[in-house]
Image: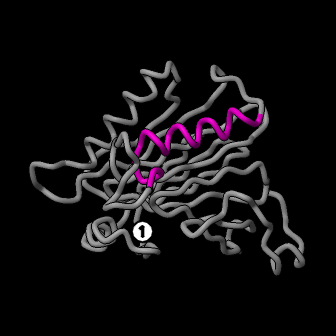
């Protein structure tokens, strides 16, 4: 990792893709900026001193980058698809997978990347509630089918199950660190996703740290 000066630690860099559902804090452990992406948002960067963080329950996140330049980003969507982008009477396109995937992929392609060079990894899609809906499964299936229909290669994935995940994505290298949430955090995930809160609580995590290089 590249060391940051004290000046950089005091003043966060400006990125046009930061909005109400994207925030940053300095992560002293990794000596870099942690950019947190909430549901209904995406973020792209080519900065070596940034990692992208998100917390997933039934939602899915795609990590997309150009491996030749290290430019890439992450999205976070809540439901598979919607043709009108309408969410309870308001336009909320990026909460739906079809809009979120298109937006992130196009943003990486605009950097000059070729479609065939895209490196794409998928995470999330847990079913935290037992019932007939299985939103996590639907989100996972949508994301995989979307890539297949678009002729895009899926490089790695960690989808499904019954546990929430915290994702740390490093676009420069393409590495993804996945941490499973403790079972005690699941009620919080369900409430947060249903209410679409403006922030996500990151609960303590445990074990099962895997690096998708």
Q: Position of residue 171 (x, y in %)?
A: 68, 46
Q: Is residue 114 left or right of residue 85?
A: right
Looking at the image, is 11 positioned above or below residue 158?
Answer: below
> Where is mark 1, residue-wise?
205
Residue farthest to the left, as pictured: 132
Whether residue 21 is situated above or below residue 143 in the rendered picture = below
Residue 167 percent location from the top left of the image: 50, 56
List the single residue furthest toward the front. Answer: 89
In x, y percent, where is residue 136?
Answer: 28, 48
Task: State the extent of the magenta-drawn residues as a range.
Answer: 92-111
Residue 94 shown in magenta: yes
Between residues 30 and 147, which one lies in front from this camera angle? 147
The image position of residue 97, as x and y in percent, is 41, 43
Q: Main secondary structure of the magenta part?
A: helix
Residue at 65% in and 71% down: 24
> On the rendered image, what quadrant is the N terminus found in?
bottom right
Front-most of residues 72 and 162: 72
Quarter of the image where one finds residue 175: top right
25 relative position to 5: left or right: left
Task: Give the residue at x 88% y 78%.
Answer: 6
Q: Is residue 86 above or below residue 5?
A: above
Name the side, left or right, on which 204 lies relative to 172: left
Left or right placement of residue 208 versus residue 19 in this view: left
Q: Residues within 10 Å of mark 1 (few under 14, many from 20)?
A: some
Secondary structure type for disc 1: strand
Q: How is the image coloured?
A: one colour
Q: Residue at x 42, y 51 (%)?
A: 77
Identify the residue at image location x=25%, y=42%.
Answer: 137
Residue 69 lies in the magenta stretch: no
Which image quarter is the C terminus in? top right
């Amino acid at each position: 990792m590249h060391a940051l000066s004290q000046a950089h630690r005091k003043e966060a860099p400006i990125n046009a893709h930061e909005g109400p559902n994207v925030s940053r804090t300095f992560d002293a452990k990794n000596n870099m900026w942690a950019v947190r992406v909430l549901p209904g948002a995406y973020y792209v960067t080519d900065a070596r001193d940034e990692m992208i963080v998100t917390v997933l329950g039934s939602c899915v996140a795609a990590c997309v980058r150009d491996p030749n330049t290290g430019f890439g980003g992450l999205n976070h969507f809540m439901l598979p698809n919607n043709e009108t982008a309408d969410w309870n009477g308001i336009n909320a396109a990026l909460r739906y997978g079809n809009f979120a995937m298109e937006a992130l992929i196009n943003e990486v392609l605009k950097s000059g990347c070729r479609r065939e060079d895209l490196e794409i990894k998928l995470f999330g899609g847990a079913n935290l509630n037992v019932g007939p809906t299985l939103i996590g499964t639907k989100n996972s299936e949508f994301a995989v089918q979307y890539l297949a229909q678009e002729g895009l290669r899926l490089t790695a994935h960690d989808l499904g199950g019954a546990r929430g995940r915290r994702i740390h994505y490093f676009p420069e290298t393409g590495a993804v660190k996945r941490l499973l949430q403790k079972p005690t955090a699941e009620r919080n995930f369900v409430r947060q996703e249903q209410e679409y809160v403006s922030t996500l609580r990151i609960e303590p995590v445990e074990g099962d740290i895997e690096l998708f290089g």
